[in-house]
Amino acid sequence: MKDIDFISFLLKQDFTFLLCKPKSEFTKILDRVDNFNKQGIKKFQFALLLKLSLSDSYPELVFAYVNACLSFKSKTNKAGSIPLEMLIYLSGARSITEAISKIGADGNGEFLIFSNSKDILGLLEKEGLFDCVREIKKRDITATDLPIISEITKNKLEAK
């Protein structure tokens, strides 16, 4: 599959962006999400826990997802999972630890979940790990966003 077709496939995903309130220890939520991310990597499924400051970053999150998936597809990824690769891309950090500390949810109250799997979100909520407070309004990705996707694709093709 060509990169542009792959990007089109990725952009057709049904992304969910939620504001959540923990109902259990945050480490339990992290462990459960981490297990899901390890299982979903071959299908490019993910769930990412973020700080509230990223609530206006929907397009950037989608592009971070595209970039992470392209990295895994071309085997140029720096991290072992799509969400960690996304954190590195979004934060501009050089290490996973730095990326997590900059933008990853820290367990201090409410947090954001960005995912392309409603199944895992429903399962986590049913397990009583958190309550969804509300869905974050998603901005449509428009033609003005396409140069960013083109740049990502160009960089990935040049890296080969």
Image: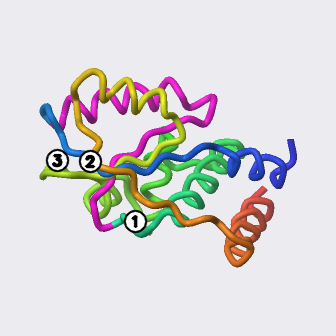
Q: Which mark is nearer the camera, 1 or 2? A: 2
Q: Is 83 a magenta residue? A: no
Residue 42 location, quadrant = top right
Which is the main secondary structure of the residues drawn in magenta? helix
- The secondary element bearing badge 2 is classed as strand
State the image coordinates of residue 120 (x, y, percent, origin top left): 43, 28
**Residue drawn at the location 27% of the way across and 35% of the way down:** 30
Q: Is residue 141 above or below residue 40?
A: below
Depth check: 72 or 141 in front?
141
Residue at the spot of label 2? 133
State the image coordinates of residue 141 (x, y, percent, origin top left): 64, 66
Q: CA distance from mark 3 to mark 1?
A: 20 Å
Residue at the spot of label 3? 107
Q: CA distance from mark 2 to mark 3?
A: 16 Å
Depth check: 32 or 68 in front?
32
Please give left or right for residue 59 compared with residue 72 in the image. Answer: left
State the image coordinates of residue 123 (x, y, percent, origin top left): 37, 23
Extreme residue in the bottom direction: 144
* Crowd band around label 1 with a 10 angstrom C-alpha radius: few (<14), some (14–19), many (20+): some
- The secondary element bearing badge 1 is classed as loop
- Image quarter of the N terminus: top right
Residue at the spot of label 1? 93
Amino acid type at image mark 1 = Ala
Amino acid type at image mark 3 = Gly
**Residue drawn at the location 37% of the way across and 52% of the way down:** 96
Question: Is the Cβ of the residue at disc 3 closer than 8 Å to that at disc 1?
Answer: no
Q: Which mark is nearer the camera, 3 or 1? A: 3
**Residue drawn at the location 66% of the way across and 43% of the way down:** 75
Question: Is the Cβ of the residue at disc 2 closer than 8 Å to that at disc 3?
Answer: no
Q: Which segment did they paint magenta?
A: 26-53
